[in-house]
Every structure is written in structure tokens, then in C-alpha cells.
Image (spheres, rainbow, N blue to C red):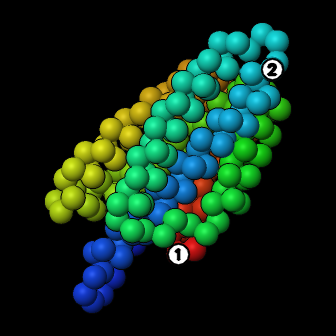
């Protein structure tokens, strides 16, 4: 689970912290959409993977809806999106396509790793903002539930199987945590 940053001192600190959260959430949903696009680009064209391609398309639809809402929140709250959005798009697509090229279990391992970090990140945010932003916390809770469903689907698809699954998931989780820290600031 991602730990929330300590409160910023001074006037406007809550607004600044919320801006960090929304910037990260926007970046994360952007990356997630592109991960699923990368996975579908590889597995959607591969014979015998029609069911998996449909599952990935459904997950991408959820992430696209989350991204659409985050884009609206960023505009409404006048939050500067991360300056690294082009990098996160490319990295997400490369991660999705790369794991899909390894095979369906690696693609599922990628999904499990990413979604486990994201759901923990959302849980920390919900706990932090719930009392002062109950409507936003409720939206994030709904998103978190969908992320948990994606994670369960990935586990059922074989995310925990394979000789290097644990290593692959650990590396992807570390990358996600680094992307969160970077996106909070940049």
C-alpha cells in the first residue's frame, strides 16, 4: 500500500495535497488505459486468445471511464496534470505489450501487480480525504472496487503461476510506486 504524504504545512495545504492526489490518479488511469491497449494489441491479434482479448477490452473500458472522470476532476479543480503524461502513455503501452508478448500469464501478472498497487493507493487516499471530501472518496471507492475485480480476474487467469511470476510482479509494483512518487511532483 502506498503511504500518504505527510500533510503540507500552511494555508492551502489541503488543496495542494488534493492536487497531488488528482495528478497521480490521472496519471495512473492514463497509464492503465495504455497498459490494456498494449496487451490487446498483442493478444487481440493472437489466435486462440479471443476470450482474453474480450476481458482486457472490458478492463480497458473501466479504466477509460476512470480516466475520463479524472480528466474532468483535473479541469474542475484546476490541477496541473503530470508533465510526464507522454512518458506514462508510452511506458504503459510498452509494459502491456511486453508482458503480453511473454504470454497470457505474464499479462495477467502485470495486471495483478498494477491493480494491487492502485487499489492500495486508492485505499490510502480514501482514508485521507474521506472526512473532508466524502463525494470524491465515494467515487474513488467505486474505482477501487473495479481495480480489485481486475486483480481477482488476473489471479484467476494465472497471474500467480509461472516460474518468474513473483519477480515480474515485484518489478512492476516497484515501477508503479516510483511512478506515483514522480507524478506527485512532476
Q: From where the camera sits, is residue 94 visible?
A: yes
Q: Are marks 2 and 1 in contact (CB under 8 Å)?
A: no
Determine which quarter of the picture holds residue 175: bottom right
Image quarter hosting the N terminus: bottom left
How far across and down, in percent of the image, does residue 127 sit?
A: 27, 56
For the residue carrying disc 2, how many other residues have a C-alpha within 10 Å: few (<14), some (14-19), or many (20+)? few
Q: Earlier in the sequence, mark 2 or mark 1?
A: 2
Identify the secondary structure beneath mark 2. loop
Above or below residue 66? Residue 155 is: above
Determine which quarter of the picture holds residue 130: bottom left
How far across and down, in percent of the image, does residue 115 sit?
A: 52, 41
Q: Residue at x 76, y 24 (%)?
A: 43
Q: Residue at x 67, y 20 (%)?
A: 53
Left or right: residue 66 versus residue 129 is right
For the residue carrying disc 1, how many other residues have a C-alpha within 10 Å: few (<14), some (14-19), or many (20+)? few
Q: From where the camera sits, is residue 171 visible?
A: no
How far across and down, in percent of the image, does residue 38 sit?
A: 73, 37
Determine which quarter of the picture holds residue 82: bottom right
Q: Name the residue tied to disc 1.
A: 185
Looking at the rendered structure, the number of numbered marks drawn on it comes to 2
| Camera-nearest residue between 36 and 102 | 36
| Camera-nearest residue between 138 and 177 | 138
> Which residue, as the protein is rendered here, is positioned at the far left?
131
Q: Residue at x 79, y 28 (%)?
A: 42
Gap in Å between the C-alphas at discs 2 and 1? 38 Å
The label number, if any, that marks residue 45 in the structure image: 2
> Which residue, as the protein is rendered here, is positioned at the far top?
48
Amino acid at each position: 500500500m502506498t503511504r500518504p504524504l505527510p500533510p503540507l504545512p500552511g494555508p492551502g495545504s489541503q488543496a495542494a495535497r488534493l492536487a497531488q492526489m488528482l495528478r497521480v490518479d490521472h496519471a495512473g488511469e492514463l497509464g492503465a488505459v495504455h497498459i490494456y491497449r498494449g496487451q490487446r494489441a498483442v493478444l487481440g491479434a493472437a489466435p486462440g486468445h479471443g476470450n482474453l482479448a474480450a476481458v482486457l477490452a472490458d478492463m480497458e473500458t473501466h479504466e477509460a471511464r476512470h480516466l475520463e472522470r479524472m480528466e474532468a476532476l483535473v479541469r474542475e479543480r484546476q490541477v496541473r496534470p503530470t508533465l510526464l503524461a507522454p512518458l506514462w502513455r508510452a511506458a504503459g503501452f510498452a509494459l502491456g505489450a511486453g508482458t503480453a508478448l511473454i504470454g497470457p500469464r505474464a499479462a495477467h501478472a502485470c495486471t495483478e501487480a498494477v491493480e494491487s498497487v492502485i487499489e492500495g493507493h486508492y485505499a490510502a487516499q480514501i482514508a485521507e480525504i474521506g472526512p473532508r471530501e466524502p463525494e470524491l472518496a465515494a467515487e474513488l471507492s467505486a474505482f477501487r472496487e473495479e481495480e480489485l475485480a481486475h486483480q481477482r480476474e488476473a489471479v484467476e487467469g494465472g497471474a500467480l503461476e509461472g516460474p518468474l511470476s513473483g519477480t515480474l510482479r515485484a518489478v512492476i509494483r516497484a515501477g508503479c510506486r516510483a511512478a506515483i512518487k514522480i507524478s506527485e511532483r512532476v
